[in-house]
Image: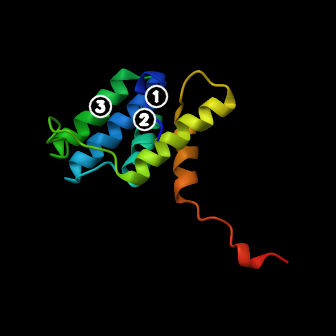
């Protein structure tokens, strides 16, 4: 199993992980799911590199009482951990120095896309 090195993540990918964790906390989940990762990537994309936009989004979540329970440790679900590992592998295969949200998306696709049906070969 590959160790996830968050220092290799771009700022936007780190934000995606942060927002995934916030989403997990909002739904009072026990671990960060694939859906939390997807929503985190979307939230990070909405914010881009704009710190004010990120603060506004967090403010919206706080006003809705969604931003709670942030002090506890929240692990990644096995599928989410696998997606992060695939993202790191894809970044290495691309020769990228950093793991981007695109790599995170590809990792999620790798985990969630069923393998081709081998019985349908002609």
How many angstroms separate mark 3 from mark 1 (CA)?
16 Å
The residue located at (29%, 28%) in the rendering is 55
Q: Which mark is residue 56?
A: 3
Q: Are marks 1 and 2 in contact (CB under 8 Å)?
A: yes
Which one is earlier in the sequence, the residue at label 1 or at label 2? 1
What SS does tag 3 mark?
Answer: helix
Q: Is residue 111 above or below residue 95?
A: below
What SS does tag 2 mark?
Answer: helix
The residue located at (67%, 33%) in the rendering is 93
Horizontally, residue 29 falls left or right of residue 111, namely: left
Q: How is the image coloured?
A: rainbow
Q: Residue 64, how many percent across, how many down?
A: 18, 46
Q: Residue 103, how many percent across, how many down?
A: 57, 37
Q: Is residue 122 above or below residue 110?
A: below
Q: Residue 16, how many percent across, how many down?
A: 41, 36
The residue at which mark 1 appears reads as 12
Q: Which mark is residue 44?
A: 2
Q: Nearer the viewer, mark 3 or mark 1?
A: 1
């Amino acid at each position: 199993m590959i160790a996830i090195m968050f220092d290799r993540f771009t700022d936007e990918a780190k934000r995606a992980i942060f927002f995934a964790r916030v989403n997990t906390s909002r739904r009072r989940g026990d671990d960060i799911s694939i859906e939390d990762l997807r929503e985190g990537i979307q939230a990070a994309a909405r914010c881009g590199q704009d710190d004010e936009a990120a603060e506004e989004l967090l403010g919206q979540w706080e006003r809705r009482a969604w931003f709670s329970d942030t002090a506890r440790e929240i692990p990644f679900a096995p599928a989410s951990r696998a997606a992060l590992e695939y993202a790191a592998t894809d970044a290495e295969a691309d020769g990228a120095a950093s793991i981007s949200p695109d790599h995170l998306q590809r990792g999620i696709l790798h985990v969630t896309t069923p393998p081709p049906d081998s019985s349908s070969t002609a």
